Amino acid sequence: MENKNEVQERAQVNTQKSVPERAQANEKKRALLVISFGTSYPETRKKTIDAIEEEMRQAFPEYDFFRAFTSPTIMRIMREREGIWVDDVEQAFERLLAEGYKEVLVQMTHVIRGFEYDRMMGTVRRYQDRFQWFACGEPLLTDEKDYQRLAEILENKFAEYRVPGAAVVLMGHGTEHVANFSYERLQKHLTDDGAGNLLIGTVEASPTLDSMMQAVEAQKPKRVLLAPLLIVAGNHVMIDMAGDQEDSWKNQFLREGYEVECNFEGLGEYPEIRKMYVEHAKGAWKRAEEMRAQEERISATQMEMGAGDGSAKSGKIVPGILWGIGVGPGDPELLTLKAVRKIKECDVLMVPGEDYRSSIAYQIAQRAIPEVEKKPCVGVELPMTRDKERLAQAHETAAKQVMDLLAQGKQVGFLNLGDVTLYATYLYIHRLVQQAGYEARLINGIPSFCATAATLNVGLAENSEQLHVLSQPEQIEEGLKLSGTKVIMKMGKNLDRVKEIIAQSGMEAMMVENCGLPGEKICRSVDEIHDGAGYYSLVIVKEK
């Protein structure tokens, strides 16, 4: 085990000098901050988080290293058991400001963008503008390349189990956040690669252990390997997966008669995973440098324009236009030609979500237009909440971000999943920008219910048949009594109730989950509609 003093010294770099001395010494230095959830298990911490941090240090030797954890419980346990103090994210940023750092590179070791990531990014956003230069790397699973790469890593890692008579069950954390979709997306890559006996379950969401056991049973294996799909092998692995209690995954599989083995390696122990984090940090650094260079070019151009009669040549900047662009429900081939052209023409793209690269709308555009990767893109926080005050504040903040760019003469494209005129949060921003006197226009996309009907190979409405779109839980029961075709969107946690109401009505129902996206699932009857369907699920109900 590491010496406690060594760990503490590494966790709190640059603490030997007084704050004024360090501030003066660090006037031109850069800081690297690695943010992790943390673990109270010293041995697995050494093999995972510490190992990731060490490779980050080696990749950025010109940066001074700092660490932060996001779990208050783990930080308290480390203080009490090991005498080790680790900063939380806010404390880490305050330390960097106090020590005079001007440029900061952040890399988190999260796997997906769940609630923990959202909270952490909220703190990051509060501090990033207080530094002259700031870059933040992405979590492990961000774009399509990440999913494919992780799938290949897992396939190679468990190659000996990719044989008849064996199955691997990977334990992910799971979340009620929409990002839980990431597990299905990764599963699709594994299945498409012919590694269908590598199955992903979660501790706290879907796919559940029950669904995993059904999936394993369908494989008819004799032996089952349980392994973490987590950065560290902490409590979830030691207790929920491999513990001796009756309801642990290990014991539940044993009771079903399988030979059960347990792997205790967290993802952070894989060299290939650590390399992915380093590459994400390098990508963030590169994008930040490109943005800085672009800002310097704009500033130089404005200075060259000088001042004079108020025309464009005399330094007056003509405000840009905001374009709300619908990118369709998922299939990049469904982008309209107009949307493709305008995306290419825009100077800056904006998308919902704190990290633009995790945005499904951005990924759709990226798959259709590879050069999108070279464009500046801004992620905008638009929380999924019914708190009107919080929503209004988020919309105003987003509108201000847009208007700052328009004032610089930029053409801004705001990408929206599906059609930008239907239930689009973007519309709030659109109105605020217009009310402020800027020009804003809409480019419609393929609506999700039209794409769903095409996927199901059915018509939505014929002759004089009416079409009803139901988007609120309280609308469904009364809405199903209306004549014609009913489209049910945004069901969320109300899916079970929706199924019950449809079954009682005697109507025909079909559902597509993740239409046009990785992990697309088609259910052609109400009986096929499965529990735990994701956020991007749409039901079409027709009269018999």
Image: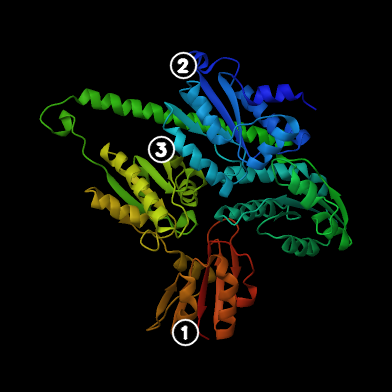
Instruction: Specify whether 246 is left or right of 460.
Output: right
Residue on which disc 3 sits = 376
Three-letter code, disc 2: Glu
Q: Residues within 10 Å of mark 3 (few under 14, many from 20)?
A: some
Residue 470 spot, x, y in % from top left: 45, 73
Q: Check the image and report above or below for 207 versus 364.
A: below
Q: Earlier in the sequence, mark 3 or mark 2?
A: 2
Q: Check the image and report above or below for 455 versus 84.
A: below
Residue on which disc 2 sits = 27
Q: Residues within 10 Å of mark 2 (few under 14, many from 20)?
A: few
Distance between mark 2 and mark 1 Cα atoms: 69 Å
Q: Nearer the viewer, mark 3 or mark 2?
A: 2
Distance between mark 1 and mark 3 Cα atoms: 48 Å
Q: Residue furthest left?
A: 309
Residue 90 spot, x, y in % from top left: 53, 35
Q: Nearer the viewer, mark 2 or mark 1?
A: 2
User: Element under label 2?
Assistant: loop
Q: Tell me the residue at 52%/18% (across/down).
A: 19
Instruction: Specify whether 118 is left or right of 86.
Output: left
Contact, mark 2 vs mark 1 (Cβ under 8 Å): no
Q: Nearer the viewer, residue 178 or 89?
A: 89
Q: Earlier in the sequence, mark 1 or mark 3?
A: 3
Instruction: Specify whether 12 is left or right of 391.
Output: right
Quadrant housing residue 494: bottom right
Q: Earlier in the sequence, mark 2 or mark 1?
A: 2
**Disc assigned to residue 481:** 1
Residue 415 spot, x, y in % from top left: 40, 50
Q: Check the image and report above or below for 225 versus 471.
A: above
Quadrant housing residue 156: top right
The answer to whether residue 114 of the structure is visible from this angle is no
